[in-house]
Image: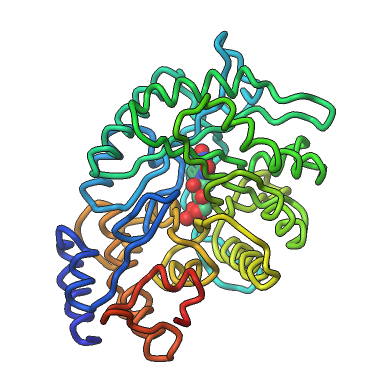
Amino acid sequence: MRERLAADFERFGRAMPPDPAAHVRETYGIDLSARYLGFELPHPIGKGSGQLSLNADQLATDREAGLAFVILKTVIAEDEAGTRSMGAWAIHETRMTVERRTAADGRAGWTVTWKGRGWDRPFEDYLALVRTAGDLTRGGALLAVPSVKYHLPHLDEPFRSAEYRYTTGRIVEAWGGGDVPLEKDFSPTLAGDALADERERILRWLREVPGEIRRASAGAPLRLAIKLMNARFDDGFQREMLAAVREADALVCFNRLWDAETRVAYGGWDLSERNLGVLRSARAAGVRLPPLVGTGNVCSGGLVLDYARAGCESVELHTFFQLPLAAYPASSGSRTQRALHALFFHPVDGMVAGMLELERSGVLHRRGGELRFLDLCQGGER
Ligand SMILES: Cc1cc2nc3c(=O)[nH]c(=O)nc-3n(C[C@H](O)[C@H](O)[C@H](O)COP(=O)(O)O)c2cc1C
């Protein structure tokens, strides 16, 4: 199988097979099926919300590349009159820099430095993208998910329910029928804001925001993922945040770290260390959690499996889809295709290599002749 994998890595670096997950199943007896918000996925690799999911062309490229799901850029909620209490997050900024970042333990990773925030165009333009997303999802071509940042109050203030109602209602309507997946973003720039400098305030948001969104959806079949930030407090508080969320159908763990000195969000190995550490410790402490989705420095198949073993049923990447072309082992294809090639087939670091290794070391066992990705999320030792 190792020889076969080396040959696949070589030839798929020139052109990926049309359905890489089916190829992996047939060739290696590995079932990569995964889940996001209860939607069945052929494999666990999706794209996190950001500058790489702003328009229909980007969605078309990702569908063609065989990505399992995409989260649309985060839109800032507004009420009927167009008022946005989180309007400071709708700033326009085009310049992004992809750069190396050395972690505290010395490992060199990648980060994207950018001072922008949420969707900076009219809400109607976002709704047009949601329409496309609904069509792609219902057609089975690609699960594409809207993302929103809603009003977050001070402790003594009520939630601005009018913003929740108007924004959610318009998104549900634009979606066009069937279950509506929605991600609510608590971003790193929020973690760096004075609004998030009190623990009690953050915990209240996590307890109450999902209920606000559900009420705002007025009975529509909403599936709600809460994407948590890395707050500027310790790991213990991060676990408290996990435990505080009520009524979410999934948790996305965790958005980027905040550099208070340079006032930018960042990723790299510090981010995956923190995220995996908190998820593992929450699991060890028996914190009861809804299904998990991982995000943060997923730059190899090995990292996908690490997040899976910490409980994540799928992963959302951003930075790895934005590297200089020379950083991918593939010699052709879109960045999404080149990234999938490395994540699936890298002979040392890929998902196939990693799952075969987990089988060899007795962590993962075949059932019905197959190794199953989702078994890893439940502990693997079946
Ligand atoms: C330039 C940039 C913009 C982003 N914008 C958003 C956003 O609007 N909403 C959101 O939920 N996450 C946003 N993210 C976070 C990513 O979706 C992802 O969760 C995070 O970067 C960690 O994954 P990574 O290490 O693979 O980049 C953004 C990330 C980057 C780098």
What residue is at 38 percent from the left and 52 percent from the top?
Answer: 46
What residue is at 52 percent from the left and 22 percent from the top?
Answer: 167
- The foreground one among 88 and 33 is 33
- Looking at the picture, does residue 298 appear above or below residue 91? below
Residue 64 shows in this picture: yes
- Looking at the picture, does residue 6 appear above or below residue 121? below
Q: Position of residue 79 (x, y in %)?
A: 58, 15
Image quarter (top left, top right, bottom left or bottom right) of the N terminus:
bottom left
Give the residue furthest to the front.
219
Q: How is the image coloured?
A: rainbow
Horizontal arrangement in the rendering, residue 305 relative to residue 216 (left or right): left
**Quarter of the view holding residue 158:** top right
- The foreground one among 338 and 220 is 220
Give the residue furthest to the bottom.
361
- The foreground one among 310 and 115 is 310
**Quarter of the view holding residue 175:** top left
Residue 112 shows in this picture: no
- The foreground one among 190 and 315 is 315
Image quarter (top left, top right, bottom left or bottom right) of the C terminus:
bottom left
Q: Position of residue 91 (x, y in %)?
A: 56, 27
What residue is at 44 percent from the left and 67 percent from the top?
Answer: 304
Q: Position of residue 294 (x, y in %)?
A: 51, 58
- Looking at the picture, does residue 115 appear above or below residue 105? above
Q: Position of residue 142 (x, y in %)?
A: 28, 44
